[in-house]
Image: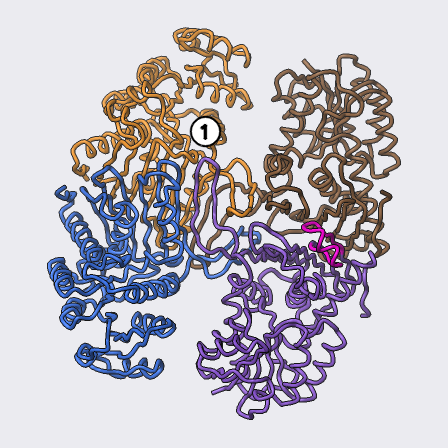
Chain colours: A purple, B orange, C blue, D brown
């Protein structure tokens, strides 16, 4: 029975908590949150105990922690958990600062613990089937990747102000998808990146120093090309698609729909729009990523490189480097090139 | 240069006329219509001459006639054209009376002329590709055929009153599709047929002795099954689909759409409905069936059985027998069985 | 906390068990199965106790039973549970004999307990959204219902031999869908039914006295029409669709797919086929029907008519009457009419 | 009767010729081609005369010329036709040199003749319906445009060597679509453009100094964003799609398919791929653009600005400027900015 502590009892923490509770061979023992009543309510519902982080980390029975607290707390919790010898699942991003993220990766390695980052898209059934079929050569060599990534509506301004900006907050998922799909586990990598964008949905976002619409182009060392388009507002729902052109065909990952009802009337044919937002679209992905984390921990003694996780802390750092480059490219109007 | 006369300058006659005009190696020489001004207008636009039927039939240069006049005139014109030794293309149906239709078939055979019936669905690109792939064994042996056949709106009551009823006027196309898809050129045939229906769109149709909605079940000698559903009203457009279950899969012929625009908004996803009506949906089919008629005539001396046409007068008679059976089944509430 | 006993620890019993375990406010206390080790394994995994039926029924703490045992045991267990004053969820069918099913319904009523039948399709997200939109008048009055119901492959012959035949075993779900969609809670009803079919997949099925492919036509008192087509074999997957033509449009319930990956190559465009079988397609429906059963029980004191369940024992009896009629129609080659 | 001369009897010339022949009120009088037998064969089939360019231009009965000859001859023919006072339809591009294209535009203006450029995509039924609905405000203000533009296979190397490169030869259509969709008849314009690309299909293309795969990002003065992805090879067919995100929704123009046959088997669901290439996909667009050209000429005396054509010579020049900018950006690795 693997004993786990959860840090963060908010929306995403609750999802991880209920997924952990449904997994065989796992006990969610502790839940920590500065909002004590949130931690207690969640703990009560699931037969866990609400405790302070320190108490959870000092219990030798705890094998792993799940970090689902606000972004600003991630690096500190990673360092403390690594120091306590606990294996770590951490929501993205590792840290808004690449330097601090790298320090976390170093600490994790030194401590010899495993650390998985919550890039849940790699566990989405549609996305992961596409990636598997791509790796099996179904469309030959990948050449061009087009990613569409749109939220239904912008988050509150208060959130935006401390989000790190659209590239670090929102496109970081897309940078990870780019690496996952086009870079083939490090055999290729970005060498040129150009980004631009605009604030089109709400002038207050511009006043807060951010944009809401962005497009990015990336070229890899071997000449593969990637386009990302992202928007904070798609009134028709959460638009999460990508497609890969290969030498022998195309693979396209479409949106998921709540139902398969189709209606026809004098105005044409209507079907469901995409799932409303990430909690709906990635419900199954969240379940599968936590199952993966636990299964890998239980398979054998994990090493510090997290090599056996589908998404390691190194993946988290690499995606943040691309997000930093995109922010720089947008600010300067110039492309960013990466040393070979 | 094959010289042709056209009988009937109405809506469908105009379509055949312009398709004939665009075919190489054909001259549309005469056009006949009791409405002289219609014949003259059409003839003028296409460089033909408006004449009486008798004059067209007595010109030895005329090799073939195209009959696109009202249903009540078909059998008389077939008999006269056969008597004059002209090859014949005739719109469905041969005649509302099976007996008269059989007399036409006999006259055609005796005269040694070719006679093709305008079951244009067999020339629709989607339907004919499906049939070809079915015959090539793509889904193994066909087992179940489901036909959906819906008009956008009922025709005028005056038309309905002399139409012969929904089974003879509208489902005759579907009975031909059933024979084309499931009966494999006579190697199988209907042995049991059951029909029912109702008047749901307009009580005046019931007062005129007809119905507007019908469903039919057919079983063939070898146990293949067919369902037809037909309605005089589908407010979303002209609904023309069928699907075939086979031992190794399914083939489905979907509706055609005017464009491929897709719209997404808060209400969902919208695409075009089907083509508005038969002139739009079967535009290409009308073109291809006339090209087929002329090409077969030009290929060599056609024999009286019309065996080389995709749709012979025998096909026309056979579809009418099924329509009669369906009308009888509906009226009696009992199935009709056919001698083996 | 509602205490529940489960009878039957097989495939469908395991599904109900885990759905019950995940529901708040419910305790799955007992599991009974003649295969003791199955009951014990399932009980152990979920913290329940494996006991004999009698012990479960005699415990006054038990409020409800879930019957997921073989068909032949249903009526006996319903009678015993009703006699013990327990509310009942029973898998379809109530019994292969309509007379015994009616006796169960009478016993349930006399005992004043609630009884829900597991017509899970009414809880499928696609089907139930369609039905809700239909009831809200989105396409006006329903006129024609077309149901496609195909299994991926025939069950073992041993199962078939005691299944009651294709109409009672397989189409009973479709008869329930017919009543749910077209009969509007008893305001309309079947008055004429005609069925035919054939054995096309395996001669051994015919030797066992059954068929594997069937089509049914139904007309209601108000003239609404229904077509059902069913097959024991669709090599492309579990095909579960229906569509309703209404006076103002069409509503179509399509198949669910495992993923939304689309592939394009020189051979065309490929997407996922439908879910493999009922456990996959109706996974969510099974979850929702059990949640509905428990929620209705907890809402207030249920009455014996089960009026507050979406699927009552009366629905179960009515579907079986239609299945009997279809079997009779097929055997006789004649339609069956129902007294008004 | 508008009298027209055609220059060029190759593949695209033949299409324009047969479209002209089918238009009422037009006579295709002359056909010129250095390959005399090509001109004569086409002229014979359509009742025209094969003559030298000079003879056609010197006939005062000729009102308009259609230029469908090789790219290198376009500017010369435009200048001569304008000098002869003929209205002009010219295939894209005006000229590979923007300076020469501008000279053509000036000559056309000075001569007071109309000049339409053959950007046939603006006449594609799907694309033009999308644009109309966009202009009618269906999705609010346009914000992001994504264009996918892929040929099934690279053209011969000899063609590529004199094509002007992928940006001028292939993406020029996409730059026109960008201006048509996002720039709203000059009320917005590109201010920033970044392009990159690679040679991925055939090293011989790189040795010829070209690439086969390109991606472009454009930002307009008002902050609208455009992404173009183009490839010389999509083995699944001619991939021509675009989609527009607006403040109130999304409009997507999908590929056209030859038929609507859908097949299901154990390997999944298959439908037709896109039309094979531009002659198939844009067959209707070619017909409609020529009808538009003639109709506008016949409507009244056209002015030299060609303002009444959907695609003027100014549109041709503007698209070439963007193509030049993209080629420069790719070569330099830097974005190009345009003076406000």
The picture places residue B124, in percent across and down from the top left corner, at 45, 35
Instruction: Identify the residue at horizontal 66%, vertical 83% (top origin).
Output: A305
The picture places residue C332, in percent across and down from the top left corner, at 13, 47
Please state if A315 lies on the left or on the right of D75 as rendered.
left
| Above or below: residue B280 compared with residue A122 | above
- Tell me which segment is drawn in magenta: A196-212
| Above or below: residue D220 compared with residue C280 | above
* Residue D309 visible somewhere in the drawing: yes
Quarter where residue A240 is shown: bottom right
Instruction: Tell me the residue that label 1 is attached to.
Output: B289
| Above or below: residue B243 compared with residue A86 | above
Quarter of the image with the C terminus of chain B in it: top left
The picture places residue B200, in percent across and down from the top left corner, at 29, 33
The picture places residue D187, in percent across and down from the top left corner, at 76, 37
* Depth order, front residue of D206/B81: D206
**C53 magenta-colored:** no
Quarter where residue C203 is shown: bottom left
Please state if B224 lies on the left or on the right of D297 as rendered.
left
């Amino acid at each position: 029975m693997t004993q786990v502590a959860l840090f963060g009892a908010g929306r995403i923490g609750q999802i991880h908590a209920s997924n952990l509770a449904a997994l065989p061979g796992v006990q969610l023992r502790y839940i920590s949150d500065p909002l004590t009543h949130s931690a207690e309510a969640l703990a009560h519902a699931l037969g866990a105990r609400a405790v302070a982080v320190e108490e959870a980390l000092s219990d030798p029975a705890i094998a792993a922690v799940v970090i689902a607290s606000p972004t600003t707390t991630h690096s500190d919790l990673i360092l403390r958990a690594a120091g306590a010898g606990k294996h770590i699942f951490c929501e993205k991003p590792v840290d808004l600062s690449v330097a601090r993220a790298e320090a976390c990766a170093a600490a994790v390695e030194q401590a010899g613990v495993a650390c998985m980052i919550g890039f849940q898209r790699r566990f989405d059934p549609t996305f992961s089937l596409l990636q598997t079929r791509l790796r099996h050569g179904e469309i030959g060599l990948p050449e061009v990747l087009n990613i569409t990534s749109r939220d239904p509506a912008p988050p509150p301004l208060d959130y935006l102000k401390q989000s790190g900006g659209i590239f670090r907050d929102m496109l970081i998922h897309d940078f990870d998808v780019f690496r996952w799909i086009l870079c083939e586990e490090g055999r290729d990598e970005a060498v040129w990146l150009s980004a631009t964008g605009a604030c089109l949905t709400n002038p207050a976002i511009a006043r807060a120093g951010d944009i809401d619409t962005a497009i990015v182009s990336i070229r890899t060392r071997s000449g593969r090309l990637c386009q990302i388009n992202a928007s904070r507002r798609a009134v028709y729902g959460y638009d999460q698609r990508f497609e890969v052109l290969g030498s022998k065909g195309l693979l396209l990952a479409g949106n998921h729909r709540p139902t398969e009802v189709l209606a026809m009337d004098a105005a044409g044919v209507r079907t469901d729009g995409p799932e409303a937002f990430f909690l709906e679209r990635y419900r199954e992905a969240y379940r599968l990523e936590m199952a993966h984390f636990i299964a890998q921990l239980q398979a054998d003694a994990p090493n510090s490189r997290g090599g056996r996780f589908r998404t390691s802390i190194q993946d988290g750092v690499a995606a943040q480097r691309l997000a930093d480059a995109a922010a720089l490219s947008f600010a300067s109007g110039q492309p960013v090139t990466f040393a070979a």
